[in-house]
Amino acid sequence: MWLISLRDLQYRYRRFLIAIAVTALVFGIAVAIAIDGIEQTLQKEPAAVVSSFDADTWAVRRGSSGLFTTNAVLPDSVVGALRARGGL
């Protein structure tokens, strides 16, 4: 069986190479679409979360790792300034 398969590849190597190239192209396009979808989700998710709280903005301490991945607490002076502006 293996010998027959190898002989078939020997005589149809162009078709085999085209099939490999097309398969790689389709796989690459599928991966690119999946990565683009993940990127779009990550860009839209923070705005969706903020709007689900019926909020206009989201206050995060400077130097924190991210909007929703930090547990840094805002100082009382910042909270007071935000309340004075009508931000809280």
Image: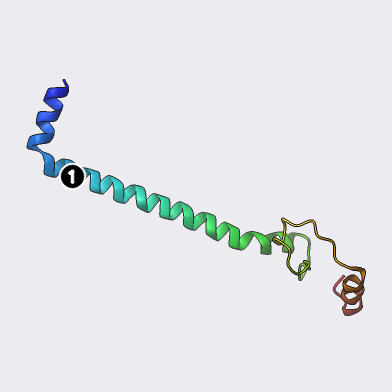
Give the quadrant of residue 4: top left
Which residue ends up furthest to the front in the rendered image? 63
Give the quadrant of residue 74: bottom right
Residue topped by disc 1: 17
- Residue 75, position as x, y percentages in the image: 88, 68
Which residue ends up furthest to the left in the rendered image? 11
Point out the image quarter for the C terminus: bottom right
Say left or right for 14 vs 35.
left
User: Which residue sits at x=30%, y=51%?
Assistant: 25
Looking at the rendered structure, the secondary structure element under dot 1 is: helix
Placement of 17 over or under 9, stated as above or below: below
- Residue 76, position as x, y percentages in the image: 92, 69
Say left or right for 71 vs 81.
left
Please name the amino acid that badge 1 sits on: Leu
User: Which residue sits at x=14%, y=42%?
Assistant: 15
- Residue 71, position as x, y percentages in the image: 79, 56
User: Which residue sits at x=7%, y=36%?
Assistant: 11
User: Which residue sits at x=87%, y=73%?
Assistant: 78
Give the quadrant of residue 61: bottom right
